[in-house]
Image (spheres, rainbow, N blue to C red):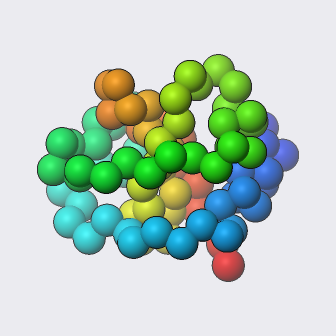
């Protein structure tokens, strides 16, 4: 993912307001699996789906100040982006 794509994704999430995940007992890093105890994976904004065109389904959670993009079938973390604003 290019830095331009990361900037576009960050911008696409600026208007999103979801409750952050409180109990984080897993590694928030690319390739880690989000456990099933995290029950809500939010649908990514359409702009993010366009940018990540290689990802057929895009879901995300917010952990602290980070947006964690997840592939829903495997629940693997695809990318982690710092949330600004």
Locate residue 36: give its quadrant. Answer: top left
User: Residue 19: which quarter of the image?
Assistant: bottom left
Give the residue at x 52% y 29%.
Answer: 57
Q: Which residue lies at the image location 74% right of the left edge and 34% below the top edge?
A: 50
Q: Is residue 2 left or right of residue 23?
A: right
Name the residue rendered at 23%, 52% in the picture. Answer: 38
49 vs 1, nearest the viewer: 49
Look at the picture and state if 23 lies above or below 37.
below
Residue closest to the far right: 4
Q: From where the camera sits, is residue 30 visible?
A: no
Q: In the shown orientation, is residue 29 left or right of residue 1?
A: left
Quadrant of the snapshot with the C terminus: bottom right
Quarter that holds the N terminus: top right
Quarter location, residue 81: bottom right
Q: Position of residue 64 (x, y in %)?
A: 41, 71
Total labels: the figure holds 0
Q: Position of residue 7 (x, y in %)?
A: 78, 54
Q: Is residue 64 above or below residue 56?
A: below
State the image coordinates of residue 70 (x, y, percent, origin top left).
Answer: 44, 39
Residue 44, placed above or below residue 63 = above
Picture coordinates of residue 41, whole percent (x, y): 37, 48
Q: Is residue 70 visible?
A: yes
Residue drawn at (44%, 51%) of the image? 42
Left or right? Give the position of 47 relative to 36.
right
> Which residue is most to the bottom?
85
Between 78 and 3, which is closer to the camera in this rendering?
A: 78
């Amino acid at each position: 993912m290019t830095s331009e794509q990361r900037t576009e994704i960050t911008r696409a999430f600026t208007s999103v307001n979801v409750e952050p995940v409180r109990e984080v007992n897993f590694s928030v890093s690319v390739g880690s699996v989000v456990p099933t105890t995290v029950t809500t994976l939010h649908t990514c904004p359409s702009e993010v789906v366009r940018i990540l065109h290689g990802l057929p389904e895009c879901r995300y959670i917010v952990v602290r100040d980070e947006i964690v993009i997840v592939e829903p079938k495997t629940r693997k973390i695809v990318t982690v982006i710092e949330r600004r604003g």
